[in-house]
Image: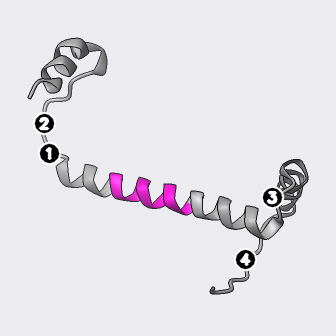
Amino acid sequence: MVNANVAFSKETLQHFAKLVELTKQPSQELAEKLFRKATDREIEDFLVSKISDEHDVEGAEMIKSEDVDWDTLLSAEAKP
């Protein structure tokens, strides 16, 4: 296990302490769980953004979501 020193604001630490109290989880366990979830989400957001950038075509026609016939589109995707 690698150790890291991270400083948080007083407000963040107060919220964290309250969450530890409410959940009755050990602070180390809870901090690791929350940090892991946050980093996983950040990585996922970053990767989705990169993929989106790669598929972004300059000058492509934009279609509004409300203009799509989702029932037809989704039923067509379900068929092999």
Residue assigned mark 1: 57
Give the number of the disc on residue 18: none
- Magenta highlight range: 39-48
Secondary structure mostly taken by the magenta-highlighted segment of the chain: helix
- Amino acid at dot 2: Ala
Residue assigned mark 2: 60
Mark 3–mark 4 distance (CA, rounded to whole Å): 12 Å
Magenta-colored stretch includes residue 35: no
- Amino acid at dot 1: Val
Secondary structure of the residue carrying numbered label 1: loop
Q: Earlier in the sequence, mark 4 or mark 1?
A: 4
CB atoms at circles 3 and 2 under 8 Å apart? no
CB atoms at circles 1 and 2 under 8 Å apart? yes
Give the number of the disc on residue 6: 4
Q: For residue 38, what is the image quadrant?
A: bottom right
Give the number of the disc on residue 12: 3
Front residue of 12/63: it is 12
Q: Residues within 10 Å of mark 3 (few under 14, many from 20)?
A: few
Marker count (numbered) = 4
Disc 3 versus disc 2: nearer the observer: 3
